[in-house]
Image: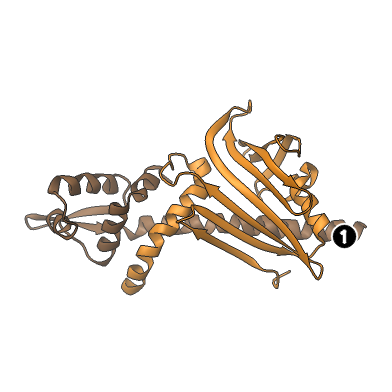
Chain colours: A orange, B brown
Amino acid sequence: MNNDLLFDFNVDKAAKTVYITREFNARQSLVWDAFTKAELLDQWGAPAPMRAKTRYMNFEVGGRRFYAMISPDGQEHWAVQEFTSITPKTNFKMYNTFADKDENRDLPGSEWDYNFSEQNGITTVRIAIFNESLERMERLADGAVKGLAAMFTILEGLLPALAQKA
Amino acid sequence: MKQDIFQAIADPTRRAILTLLAIQALTPNVMAEKFDMTRQAVSKHIKVLHECELIKPEQSGREIYYHFNAKKMQEFDHWLAQFRQNWETQFNQLDQLLTTIKEQE
């Protein structure tokens, strides 16, 4: 299904940024809603069998989404997204941090920048995830992104050698 | 996955050591020579890499050779693939949701 839709995933270690690009077969306003409305986000915003549950979401500059990713065993992993910039239908930025169930944030987090554009009925979403510090990778929770950047760094060096061995 | 690994590979010298060990096993003395470092400095890096199982020692005669632990690297690789897969799964879910919404309109 939708195999012709672009999916691109890159890491720029110098910029400490992960880039994700994906096309969707829908108009821009609908895709925008899917990324910015809690009731829609909760329907797709966690990879099955995980599920997302938003406790509240104020989609405005300075507002927050406080939500959990819930594992099949019922464990809740809470996070806070704070919206730092919104240009309706085309761009929003947020600061994402993991948190406890009482919304106490565990800083530092990562900066997310979402861009939306449409051409011929296909909407392209470009996501850039920036982490201040590659060195501060103490936690696996947020390490999903931070560790990823480090991984690419090391894989770049190692893969040629591993390929020779195989 | 152990958090130590992220700290271990954040250091450029340790990344260089790993790259070298992936090609051939080395003794601490040879590593010190290749990187123009003191034996003491090398030992510190070896300790960190060993603790997170990225390298493993093997005694050969009177010398200890350190080998690159490819299995640990594969775990990494697997985890990386998993992260990308998570995104793919989510986006496929969104494809379905968008289709459903469009049909309802």
Q: Quadrant of the C terminus of chain B?
A: bottom right
Instruction: Determine if residue A72 is in view.
Output: no
Which residue is painted at 14% across and 49% down in the image? B38
Instruction: Determine if residue B104 is in view.
Output: yes
In the visual, does A164 lie left or right of B60?
right
Pointer 1: what residue? Answer: B102
In the foreground, A18 or B99: A18
- What's the residue type where badge 1 is placed? Lys
Which residue is painted at 61% across and 41% down in the image? A95
Task: State which quadrant residue B75 falls in.
Answer: bottom left
Q: Furthest residue to the right?
A: B105
Image location (x, y in percent) of residue B29: 12, 55
Q: Residues within 10 Å of mark 1 (few under 14, many from 20)?
A: few
SS of the residue under disc 1: helix
- The chain to which mark 1 is attached is B
Task: State which quadrant residue A56 falls in.
Answer: top right
Image location (x, y in percent) of residue A140: 48, 42
Q: Furthest residue to the left?
A: B62
In the visual, does B60 lie left or right of A61?
left
Whether A26 is drawn above or below A41: the answer is below
Task: State which quadrant residue B40 falls in.
Answer: top left
Image location (x, y in percent) of residue A153: 41, 58
Number of marks drawn: 1
